[in-house]
Image (tube, rainbow, N blue to C red):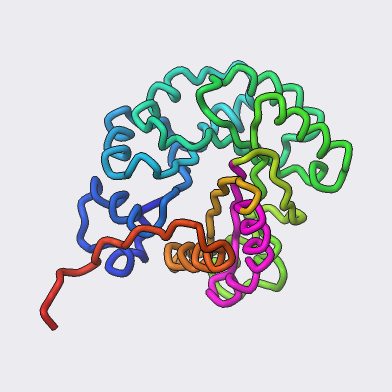
Amino acid sequence: MWAHRSWQGRFLAHPLPAQERLRHYAGWCDAVEGNTTFYATPSRDAVASWARQTGPDFRFVVKLPKLVTHERRLADAELGAFLDAIEPLGPRAHALWVQLPGSFAPADVPALARFLRRLPASHRQAVEVRHPAFFADAHAARLLEETLAVTDAEWIPFDTTAFFASPPTSDAEREAWTRKPRLPLRTRALTDRPIVRYLGRDDPERTVDGWRHWVDVVAGWLREGRSPTVFVHTPDNADAPALARRFHDEVRGRVPGVEALPEPVPVGPLTLF
């Protein structure tokens, strides 16, 4: 996501042509979740436009289509058209994001193993599971980790613990309360490029309080030589770009060698006053 309505005039200039929105977003953050690809495979021309709006070090974590992960559940999945569509991203395609439904259980891991082996080695793989057994059952967790290790795939944790720590207080939180998975915290990285998805609250300070452990974890990963990617969400996502930069600044305070994020494109015209 790089074009939220509430960001217009705050983080992104307004009005702004659609083909410029990603470029302005890339002034705030250097990675994005490619969530739109879950619903439809984009055209190569659209993806080429994404590449033109971002630098070669920008990271796209591209979600596989729901037809593959949720409807066919990885069976008889043809990804040729999808992989061809995202080819213009080149090195920006940081990982293929395999988000699996909550019904995808430990018994289904062999299907995941077969699927991952069919993916091209040129693309990194990252898997998000939501079945509670993967978090509560040590044997199930070990089975999944061993399966991911075969193709050097990462396990993406979606941390909702701060969100579910107390009842919702806004309409966006109440809606998210019914849709988001309620799973235990997981902070173990399997590869040199871990990916974290974190959901806070609509109150920015509560979001910040909930990510304290991630600042420690991510700083530790960086000291180990890993290259993590962290996505910060809130139910309304109104302040997400600023919160992402705040998280980055906190980690950078622990690990001074981390590069600063880019300077945002000015939202309004420059004036003398």
At horizontal 32% and vertical 27% (from top left) the residue drawn is 44
Left or right for 99, reference 41: right
Left or right for 141, reference 151: right
Pick out the residue farthest to the bottom. 273
Q: Position of residue 228 (x, y in %)?
A: 57, 48
Residue 218 falls inside the magenta stretch = yes
At horizontal 24% and vertical 45% (from top left) the residue drawn is 19
Q: Looking at the image, is 17 positioned above or below residue 245?
A: above
Q: How many marks?
A: 0
Quarter assignment of residue 214:
bottom right
Position of the C terminus, as image quadrant, is: bottom left
Residue 128 falls inside the magenta stretch = no
At horizontal 65% and vertical 66% (from top left) the residue drawn is 163
Q: Nearer the viewer, residue 189 or 157?
A: 189
Q: Nearer the viewer, residue 231 or 44?
A: 231
| Range of residues picked out in magenta | 193-222
Q: Looking at the image, is 114 positioned above or below residue 139?
A: above
Pick out the residue farthest to the front. 257
Q: Position of residue 236 (x, y in %)?
A: 49, 65
* Prevailing SS of the magenta stretch: helix
Quarter assignment of residue 182:
bottom right
Q: Position of residue 226 (x, y in %)?
A: 60, 45
Q: Position of residue 259 (x, y in %)?
A: 44, 56
At horizontal 71% and vertical 44% (from top left) the residue drawn is 130
Left or right for 33, reference 273: right
Quarter assignment of residue 37:
top left
